């Protein structure tokens, strides 16, 4: 019962992350379920679904199929769809029922590839993990399958990893980051997964540095570092005051080849733990929360800023007093902790707030509140966060 949510909706699951990561590829994606998980993905977790013609299918799993294990029925459906679509690749994405009955999703994908002659992937997603895991395993699979060594670009260049639609919704944040990169003399070899194509995927090793803009891209950055020696920088420059320092660190990573995390230092001697009423709590995806923390600190916020991670926490992206918030109970305890007088979080999390004297600043995240608050999300790059924060401070933040 510890994982029971009473006020909060379920956050975007791993199967949605995997399907979303393949959305811009010419991929025939099949969610192996009875239709509920597919409906959840296209209706709530994928902001780009409406108005597109992306081939995402439901396997139409029925009780008798689960009991009898009729994999041939699924394989025949996929092969028939592939004849009509002629996709570049095929993906079978798991859901809770295949997990319970022990369905070999990877084995089915292997059989489909043998018969169709098209690269096929089977992702053992279960709905028990969050979307970032699904994004990570899908991107890692693409890198392992298609990326090859190639010559470095003549000018400084980067790949942007972890630029998934669930983290960044419909905001122009990644486009703004690309503009700043161009102004700083960096070209962009590939953006993964949003906007990815087979051509850009195969040439990812031309980049000098990988920029990791969400936790979902960290695994892929480590994979590319281990296989091809490409160093990575984790972080985002939210707020104008962060931009010079961020791009200085990017140049340092490019020249030294040593990985770095923006906003995280090996020297923690000056860090203070939040005390009664003097701290700021930023709740959400870890990399974005680190970026908000840096912007708030650069803006002169007097109290210590703590990050509360909703979807999981990487130790290398942490400061000592950051916390992992694994369920609604832990989120509620953190958001109502008297050590914090200011909270940044998705608007849905305000339902948990009991102390109305706290300042609450809404930072919508598509993986939490979906399209309900999607249009309220701001472009946080290049002064966008500064303007957004100023607009909120001009109002009574507790009444938002």
Image: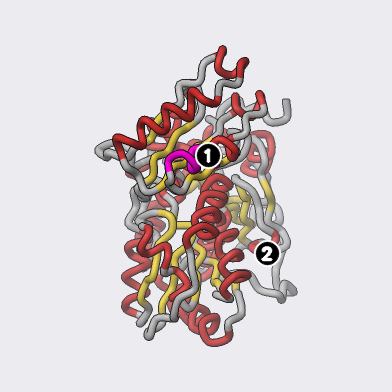
Closest to the observer, 230 or 243:
230
Q: Is residue 1 magenta?
A: no
**Residue at label 1?**
109
- Magenta-highlighted stretch: main secondary structure? helix
User: Relative to residue 165, is residue 203 depicted above or below?
Assistant: below
Task: Answer whether residue 241 is visible to the viewer in this image.
Answer: no
- Residue 323 picture location, percent across and down: 69, 51
Element class at badge 2: helix
Closest to the observer, 126 or 198:
198
- Residue 192 picture location, percent across and down: 43, 58
Task: Answer whether residue 273 is visible to the viewer in this image.
Answer: yes
Q: CA distance from mark 2 to mark 1?
A: 34 Å
**Within the image, what quadrant is residue 86 found in?**
top left
Q: Residue at x 60, y 75 (%)?
A: 259
**Residue at label 2?**
316
Q: Residue at x 45, y 76 (%)?
A: 150
What quarter of the picture does the C terminus occupy? top left
Element class at badge 1: helix
Magenta span covers which residues?
A: 110-116
- Residue 370 picture location, percent across and down: 42, 37
What quarter of the picture does the N terminus occupy? top right
Count of labels in the image: 2
Closest to the observer, 395 or 376:
376
Q: Residue at x 63, y 57 (%)?
A: 306
Q: Residue at x 38, y 70 (%)?
A: 189
Dot in front, 2 or 1: 1
Tell me if mark 1 has few (under 14), some (14-19) or many (20+) residues whose alpha carbon lies within 10 angstroms of its own. many
- Residue 15 picture location, percent across and down: 52, 37
């Amino acid at each position: 019962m510890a994982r029971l949510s009473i006020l909060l909706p379920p956050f975007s699951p791993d199967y949605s992350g995997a399907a979303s990561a393949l959305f811009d590829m010419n991929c025939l994606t099949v969610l192996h379920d009875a239709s509920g998980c597919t409906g959840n993905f296209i209706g709530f977790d994928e902001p780009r679904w409406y108005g597109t013609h992306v081939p995402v299918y439901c396997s139409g799993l029925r009780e008798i199929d689960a009991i009898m294990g009729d994999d041939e029925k699924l394989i025949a459906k996929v092969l028939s769809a592939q004849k009509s679509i002629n996709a570049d690749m095929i993906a079978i994405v798991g859901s809770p029922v295949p997990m319970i009955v022990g369905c070999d999703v990877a084995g089915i994908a292997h059989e489909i590839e043998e018969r169709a002659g098209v690269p096929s992937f089977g992702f053992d997603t279960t709905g028990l993990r969050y979307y970032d895991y699904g994004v990570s395993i899908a991107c890692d699979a693409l890198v392992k399958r298609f990326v090859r060594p190639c010559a470095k670009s003549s000018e400084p260049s980067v790949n942007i990893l972890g630029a998934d639609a669930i983290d960044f919704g419909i905001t122009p944040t990644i486009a703004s980051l690309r503009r700043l990169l161009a102004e700083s003399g960096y070209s962009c070899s590939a953006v993964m997964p949003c906007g990815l194509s087979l051509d850009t995927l195969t040439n990812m090793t031309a980049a000098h540095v990988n920029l990791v803009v969400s936790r979902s891209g960290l695994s892929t950055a480590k994979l590319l570092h281990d296989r091809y020696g490409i160093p990575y920088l984790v972080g985002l420059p939210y707020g104008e005051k962060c931009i010079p320092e961020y791009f200085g660190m990017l140049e340092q990573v490019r020249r030294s080849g040593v990985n770095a995390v923006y906003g995280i230092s090996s020297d923690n001697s000056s860090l203070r733990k939040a005390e009664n009423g003097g701290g700021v709590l930023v709740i959400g995806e870890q990399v974005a929360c680190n970026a908000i923390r840096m912007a708030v600190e650069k803006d002169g916020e007097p109290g210590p800023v703590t990050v509360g991670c909703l979807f999981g926490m990487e130790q290398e992206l942490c400061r000592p007093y950051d916390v992992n918030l694994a369920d609604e109970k832990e989120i509620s305890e953190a958001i109502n902790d008297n050590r914090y007088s200011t909270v940044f979080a998705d608007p849905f999390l305000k339902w948990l707030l009991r102390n109305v004297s706290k300042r609450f600043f809404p930072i919508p995240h598509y993986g939490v509140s979906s399209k309900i608050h999607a249009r309220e999300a701001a472009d946080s790059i290049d002064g966008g966060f500064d303007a957004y924060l100023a607009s909120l401070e001009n109002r009574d933040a507790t009444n938002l």
